[in-house]
Image: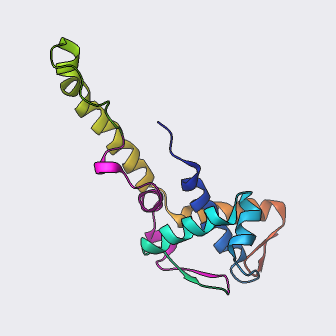
Amino acid sequence: MQISSRFTIALHIFACVEVFKEKQRLTSSFLSQSIHTNPVIIRNILLQLKRAGLIEVARGSGGITVEKPLSDITFYDVYEAIEPLENGSLFHFHEAPDPKCPVGRNIHTLLDDKLNNIQKAMEEKMKAYTLADLSDDMRQILKKEGEEYGNERLS
């Protein structure tokens, strides 16, 4: 199991929005340079984030607006927008284990609760981090580097 890079790309996009919103047109081309990926991938992720109600995108002008306070958007919200779970389950079970086999007929009894608990733990941990945390951490990193954050000179 591996969460695709689209999740971290989405977080990267949110970080760029916060750092560059006051001084740079945030186009898919600009974002793709920062992320080193194809602009089409960026546009698809932006569309997913928009559908989830997390951002608004001004077509053509490159304006991206976050639709909620950063403290109200968790990593889980972003994950849910970008990595929708099939049937709400993180783990996909192999199809039709053999009911004649003692392991096959009992595998769900053996694993379902454990895998459900693992998924719930991961989701709860993701809900503990917000985009405000990401923004605060980015501000601290850039401050150490003497960089700007938005229009603010950090030193």
Place of residue 79 in the rendered image (x, y in percent of width and height, measured from the top left)? 46, 56
Count the marks. Answer: 0
Residue 128 occupies quadrant: bottom left
Place of residue 145 in the rendered image (x, y in percent of width and height, measured from the top left)? 83, 61
| Left/right of residue 118 with respect to residue 153 in the rendered view | left
Q: Is residue 136 visible?
A: no
Question: What residue lies at 54% left-to-right and 47% top-to-bottom?
Answer: 4
Question: What residue lies at 74% left-to-right and 57% top-to-bottom?
Answer: 36
Asked if the magenta segment contains residue 16, the reply would be no
Relative depth, front residue between 109 and 143: 109
Relative depth, front residue between 140 and 119: 119
Q: Is residue 69 visible?
A: yes
Give the quadrant of the C terminus: bottom right
On screen, residue 104 above or below 11:
above
On screen, residue 28 above or below 118:
below
On screen, residue 97 above or below 87:
above
Colour scheme: rainbow
Q: Which residues are magenta?
A: 61-90
Question: What residue lies at 64% left-to-right and 65% top-to-bottom?
Answer: 40
| Left/right of residue 9 with respect to residue 47 in the rendered view | right
Place of residue 132 in the rendered image (x, y in percent of width and height, measured from the top left)? 54, 67
Place of residue 133 in the rendered image (x, y in percent of width and height, measured from the top left)? 55, 62
Question: What residue lies at 70% left-to-right and 57% top-to-bottom?
Answer: 37
Asked if the magenta segment contains residue 74, the reply would be yes
On screen, residue 29 above or below 103:
below
